[in-house]
Amino acid sequence: MNAPLPRHITDTPANTYERVATISNEVAGKLAARLRAETQGEVLFSAADRGRYATDASIYQVTPVGVFVPRHAHEVPIALEICRDLNVPIVPRGGGTSQCGQTTGAGLVIDHSKHIRNVIQLDVEARTVEVEPGMVLDHLNAQLKAHGVWFPVDVSTSAQATLGGMAGNNSCGSRSIAYGNMVHNVVGANAWLSNGELMQLGNYGTSSGRAQQMGDFVKHLAQGLTPELEAHWPKVMRRVAGYNLDIFNNQNERPYTHDGSVNLAHLLIGSEGTLGLTKSLTLKLSDLPRAKVLGVVNFDSFYKAMDAAQHIVKLGDGTLTAVELVDRTMIDLSLQNPAFAPTIRTALIGEPEAVLLVEFAGANKEMLKPKMRQLVELMGDLGMPGSVVEMIDDTPQKNLWEVRKAGLNIMMSLKGDGKPVSFIEDCAVPLANLAEYTDELTQVFKRHGTKGTWYAHASVGTLHVRPILDMRRNGAAKMREIADEASALVRKYKGAYSGEHGDGLCRGEWIEWQFGPKINEAFTQIKQHLDPLNLLSPQRIVNPPKMDDTSLMRFGNDYKVIPIQTALDWRAWDVQNDPATEQTTAPGTGGDAAQGFAKAVEMCNNNGTCRKFDAGTMCPSYRVTRDEKHLTRGRANTLRLALSGQLGVEGLSNPELMEAMDLCVGCKGCKRDCPTGVDMARMKVETLHHYKAKHGFSLKDLLIAYLPRYARHAARWSGMLNLRNKIPLLAQLAERFTGLSAQRSWPTWQGQHFFNQGTQGVSKEAVLSADKPVVLFVDTFNGYFESSNAHAALRVLQAAGYSVHVASKNERGHGADAGHLCCGRTFLANGMVDKAREHARELIDTLLPFAERGIAIVGLEPSCLLTLRDEALVLGLGDSAHRVSEQALLLEEFLAREAKTGALDELKLHLKPADKAILLHGHCHQKAFGLMPPVLDVIRLIPNAAPELIESSCCGMAGSFGYEASHLEVSMQMAELSLLPAVRAKPEAIVVADGTSCRHQIEDGAARQAIHVAQLLSDHLKY
Ligand SMILES: Cc1cc2nc3c(=O)[nH]c(=O)nc-3n(C[C@H](O)[C@H](O)[C@H](O)COP(=O)(O)OP(=O)(O)OC[C@H]3O[C@@H](n4cnc5c(N)ncnc54)[C@H](O)[C@@H]3O)c2cc1C
Ligand code: SF4
Ligand code: SF4
């Protein structure tokens, strides 16, 4: 929705841009109207849209006047012209992953990341590529790989960071010791100045016109400041503060150009959108390293690790590409994370206090092995023999780098209001002083009752560290005190206060401190020279606000949560923590007025990992729309704003909130992939509960939710109901009344279904006393619509020698139709939590006697069975829910587990070999619970079976989502991302998909019948 300016700009307290504060609704309205009239871009001026762009990965929040998402590059200067006419500042933005508030600003935010992201020209021979600013680094490198080259500024956010944003911040990667920072790797830039001129920036010697004029001006300034530059400019490679005045008088330990020439594009690098709007960048490419080896050095003290870095970098001679730190806290956090624990263990010798990841790269592994030997010898010479884990193979190296890259995110998963805060996290000091510096800063943290976790770039003296502070209480004051002491240390050790993440709001005020008043004045003059209108990101770098101005903060003094009574139990998030020990208080004691829901939502720190595009990961709705609104981060921000009353008094019943939730398919990709564990699927249930309580349920909601209740009656009318799939007019009528698309076939009702075919399996008494007992929970979908799956599961389990009891309301098994049980999933999906609780309670009460005997409860439909291990635990059903959840397994999990004990040896003898290729698509909830390996294991029980897992995200059907006419297009787009092309590519293969809706999507989209794994096994039984 693009409602025109629902609230007054001047209402926002976090408004330090005086000019913007005076912008009337009238001006903002004119701005929106002109953008709409003169461009085809998206013009987003609603309160929720503005709120979603008010934050980045920093602690700050400043609400913009509006957001513009240009569709074409030529629309950027049009927007610039309109802003100039109306005197509205501009804040350019890429992925919005800045940690210092660079992209939070009043004015018009221009989001380049959605459309302005093309490669303009690639010249492999010259090793250069020209790109638009919204291009994401990983996407560029994926395109370059085939040519054997890459852009080597490998920031940890490579999957989200745009080249324009990286240039804006002068970003630096883990391998900067070998390749340098952004400034060392940009050879040209085109940028729009605020007066509308397009400036072409490159070699100063050959420049002309406006660029040359600008170069002459900056040169003159630099020449007049030689003593100041030499006295105050940090001499380390990692200095990113201020403007690069030193292009004319190099101060960097790694000169910006290899031949000492001056490149005017370098003035733009690190300017944080304050000098020009980048139109394109020409980047210098490097050869892809052919081989890498990694030595992981284990240290028994942190100090020794820091002290060793200066010696290790001397092993360089061009092959050393990284020396990265992982400290004890990070090791422990990684060990606690099931996804990272196996990997980090491969790097450890005993229980080190820190490890350094030392990477060498070159033409082949053979030539690198001597480097590894030198490292081992060096450690011996330093008194640490036997401390190096040698990783020669690529896979373990790659896995360990993933853990290191996830470092910050791992750290941010701390629950409670105290969070690791970014403000002195990237000071750079000369390597010789690194040990002393880190030691003294650790003491500073201790004195302030907090602690910091250290990690990252030891090779260049830039270690990341974030003390834990509570920004809602005394955090801002502590921030100031710690920053004062840290800066004194940086000065003592002749370092750079801002060494990687930029200045933004939290380090802008330290620029003058770092460089002195004269250089600071030169920065002001550069700004005035290029942006005399002060239109581009005002009050950044020049004339910045105070870093501890709480009116600019996301959790400022006036941040308050609206009290609500939650439907689900969120108490696990309602805790506080001790900054020194990181111990958390008991669940429910955190003081959250929203009973823990707000604190769960606030776990999103805006780092933007959900903007990934890898198949198989969050977030499918973002992958097809590229909209901030349809991204996990956008949803979490909208929820936070709604819960804290920043979207008005409606709280969770705000329609703008529901719009943001609309395309969330509840896939739980975020539950698995979000580093801080934001589970948007669960949040959507809670939100729907509140929203529907006010706005009511539609016919479609009721039809879907109550399906388990009316299924047994409806099945009796199967013949008539199935006509809907045969007569288009009926389908169209049904669409009109229900909103369910006429273009979709509905699941076919079966007159004879699993539940009315007589008692199958053994009785309750029999299973309780059986030698090989198992309970089969047959859900609504497999029971009423695809009974053959339930029969197949029964057959396979019986063939394996199990006494199978089919869970039922009836004591003797399902027998009569009325015995069918339900987990409550369809009610949850529609926000009817109370009804879901009734069903889940009945199911759990029925299953409890089996669970108490340790009997496995096996289910077929992932979303139903896994409800027992997920939402059923937060429905207030007490200990019984936990006991049942411990025994609840998907069929494949159960079989895989049993196979390991030898219990399926007999079954294996009865399976005939596979004679076709097998493709496997995982249901989202299977993936979220890490359950694809057991499916693969179970398929491999079939002789000759070589299942191939399709790298896919959500199939797009997601329960009823894809059936809805309003979602049909998005649903098919999700399926087309990878699933359907993979299925079409193997026309002969059997397609296995355990999810009912996944099977329907595959049938609708690729005209192929996918089968449940139970069916596959049953089909391969010899008898
Ligand atoms: C978990 C995490 C890890 C990180 N790791 C690293 C790391 O390893 N190394 C590192 O250097 N940084 C790191 N960062 C910081 C951040 O990711 C990088 O600075 C990144 O390059 C920013 O890219 P972006 O597209 O998100 O830019 P944004 O945050 O959107 O913008 C960055 C700056 O560029 C400006 N800008 C954007 N587009 C334009 C344009 N077209 N014209 C003019 N100015 C523009 C913006 O105004 C802003 O000042 C990390 C951040 C997080 C959250
Ligand atoms: S939802 Fe998770 S991954 Fe996305 S920005 Fe928030 S914390 Fe990061
Ligand atoms: S549940 Fe899926 S669609 Fe919804 S926010 Fe998470 S990853 Fe995105």
Image (spheres, helix red, strand yellow):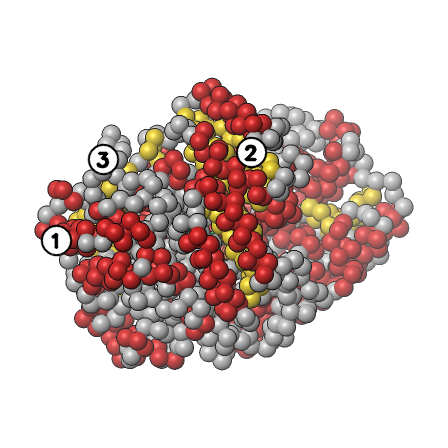
Amino acid on which the number 2 mark rests in the picture:
Val
- Residue at (52, 33) in percent of width and height: 397
* Residue sitting at the far left: 209
Looking at the picture, how far across and down is residue 436, in whole percent?
Answer: 52, 47
Label 1 and label 2: CA atoms lie apart by 51 Å
The answer to whether any part of residue 196 appears in the image is yes
Q: Is residue 829 above or below residue 792?
A: below
Amino acid on which the number 1 mark rests in the picture:
Gln
Characterize the local packing of mark 3: few (<14), some (14-19) or many (20 or more) Cα atoms within 10 angstroms: few
Kindly indicate the quadrant of the structure image that contains residue 803.
top right
Characterize the local packing of mark 1: few (<14), some (14-19) or many (20 or more) Cα atoms within 10 angstroms: few
Residue that badge 1 annotates: 213
Label 2 and label 3: CA atoms lie apart by 35 Å
Looking at the picture, how far across and down is residue 851, in whole percent?
Answer: 81, 52
Residue that badge 3 annotates: 259
Looking at the picture, how far across and down is residue 268, in whole percent?
Answer: 26, 52
Q: Secondary structure at mark 2?
A: strand
Looking at the picture, how far across and down is residue 252, in whole percent?
Answer: 32, 44
Q: Nearer the viewer, residue 147 or 989?
A: 147
Q: Are marks 1 and 2 in contact (CB under 8 Å)?
A: no
- Residue at (47, 66) in percent of width and height: 480
Amino acid on which the number 3 mark rests in the picture:
Asp
Kindly indicate the quadrant of the structure image that contains residue 128.
top left
| Left or right, 165 with reference to 803 | left
Specify the label residue 277 is tagged with: none
Residue that badge 2 annotates: 296
Which tag, 1 or 2, sits closer to the chain's start?
1
Q: Are marks 2 and 3 in contact (CB under 8 Å)?
A: no
Q: Nearer the viewer, residue 1014 or 268?
A: 268
Residue depth check, mark 2 versus mark 3: number of the one nearer the observer: 3
